[in-house]
Image: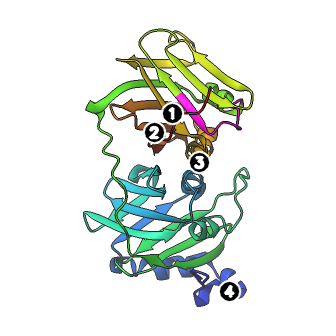
């Protein structure tokens, strides 16, 4: 069932009405909402959401710090897009936290309703409103004087997996330039079902290995490489992760400038991507992945 509900103002004739009339009308009603957020450039939000768009449904957590949008698959991989309150030019929330589920595909369809291409001097502004439990998420988008309203059905949130990834339990951590990891990922043997991460204070320091039709192949990253910005490894760890679970992180890797790789005592993996938006603001997308516990592949 289509979850975009057009308001009377959204028809072709309604879209062409003056921006001032519609903006004034909705500003007068802001008091009824528990959350009101405004962006001058909607791509600063949509690009981050695309980076975690590997499943249909997302859970949105809104707090005074901003929005966290969480997507999970099989309780084995979790992606989180963080949209800080500072990214918005106006951000008001009246409760400590608001939580709801939403169809992420539908949300992105609305956010990119004017198109997703970046044209110099042309930006789509966004006003987003939410009244609380059971209410739809209201979007008002404007580009070059043309306005569109969207109302997206929200769903009751379910508990998301707590990976309990604490800094004090991190054994090894590396911060590197994303271009280096992008190149390594592009050369992976995709016939391998797993990707092995070896991190160690001793050589080879950081090694990624696959076990496909071509046999064992690996890529090494010396700790003194220009691509490695920080190297904090306390002990040798070798863990394997299903490539199918890591694939969703490639979208975030593609638009990031730096990536933090962390592994905790349990072998849980955290990939945190630093992404600069079109206004030069720094945002983060983070993925958590559990290690593969199946029988090890033949080497």
Q: Earlier in the sequence, mark 3 or mark 2?
A: 3
Residue closer to the observer: 234 or 51: 234
- The answer to whether residue 194 is above or below residue 226 is below
**Circle 2 is placed at which residue position?**
291
Task: Say if residue 257 shows up in the picture.
Answer: no
Taking the magenta stretch, the answer to whether it contains residue 124 is no
- Judged from the image, the secondary structure of the residue bearing numbered disc 2 is loop
Q: Position of residue 72 (x, y in %)?
A: 47, 56
Query: Marks 3 and 2, Cα distance to the nearest angstrom?
Result: 16 Å
**Circle 4 is placed at which residue position?**
11
- Judged from the image, the secondary structure of the residue bearing numbered disc 1 is strand
- The answer to whether residue 174 is above or below residue 159 is above
Asked whether the residues under the numbered discs 1 and 4 touch, taking CB atoms below 8 Å apart as contact, a structural biologist would say no
Q: Quadrant of residue 90?
A: bottom left
Taking the magenta stretch, the answer to whether it contains residue 189 is yes
Q: Where residue 240 is drawn, which disc sits there?
A: 1
Q: Which of the two discs, 3 and 2, sits closer to the camera? A: 2
- Judged from the image, the secondary structure of the residue bearing numbered disc 4 is loop
Segment colored magenta? 187-196
**Circle 3 is placed at which residue position?**
248
């Amino acid at each position: 069932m289509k979850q975009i509900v057009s308001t009377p103002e959204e028809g072709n004739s309604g879209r062409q009405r003056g921006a001032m009339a519609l903006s004034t009308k909705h500003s007068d009603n802001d008091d009824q909402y528990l959350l009101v957020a405004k962006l001058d450039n909607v791509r600063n939000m949509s690009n981050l959401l695309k980076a975690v768009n590997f499943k249909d449904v997302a859970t949105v957590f809104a707090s005074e710090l901003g929005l966290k949008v969480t997507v999970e698959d099989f309780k084995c991989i979790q992606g989180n897009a963080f949209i800080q309150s500072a990214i918005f030019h106006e951000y008001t929330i009246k409760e400590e936290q608001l939580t709801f589920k939403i169809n992420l595909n539908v949300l992105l369809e609305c956010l990119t309703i004017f198109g997703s291409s970046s044209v110099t001097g042309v930006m789509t502004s966004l006003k987003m409103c939410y009244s609380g439990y059971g209410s739809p998420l209201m979007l008002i988008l404007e580009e070059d004087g043309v306005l569109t309203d969207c109302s997206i059905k929200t769903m009751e949130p379910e508990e998301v997996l707590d990976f309990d990834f604490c800094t004090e339990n991190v054994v090894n951590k590396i911060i590197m330039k994303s271009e280096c990891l992008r190149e390594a990922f592009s050369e992976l043997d995709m016939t391998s079902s797993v990707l092995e991460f070896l991190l160690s204070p001793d050589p080879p320091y950081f090694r990624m290995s696959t076990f496909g039709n071509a046999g064992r192949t690996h890529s090494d990253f010396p700790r003194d490489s220009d691509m490695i910005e920080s190297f904090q490894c306390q002990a040798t760890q070798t863990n394997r992760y299903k490539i199918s679970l890591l694939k969703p992180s490639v979208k975030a890797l593609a638009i990031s400038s730096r990536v933090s790789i962390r592994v905790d005592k349990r072998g849980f993996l955290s990939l945190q991507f630093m992404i600069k938006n079109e206004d030069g603001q720094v945002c983060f997308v983070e993925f958590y992945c559990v290690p593969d516990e199946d029988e090890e592949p033949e080497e």
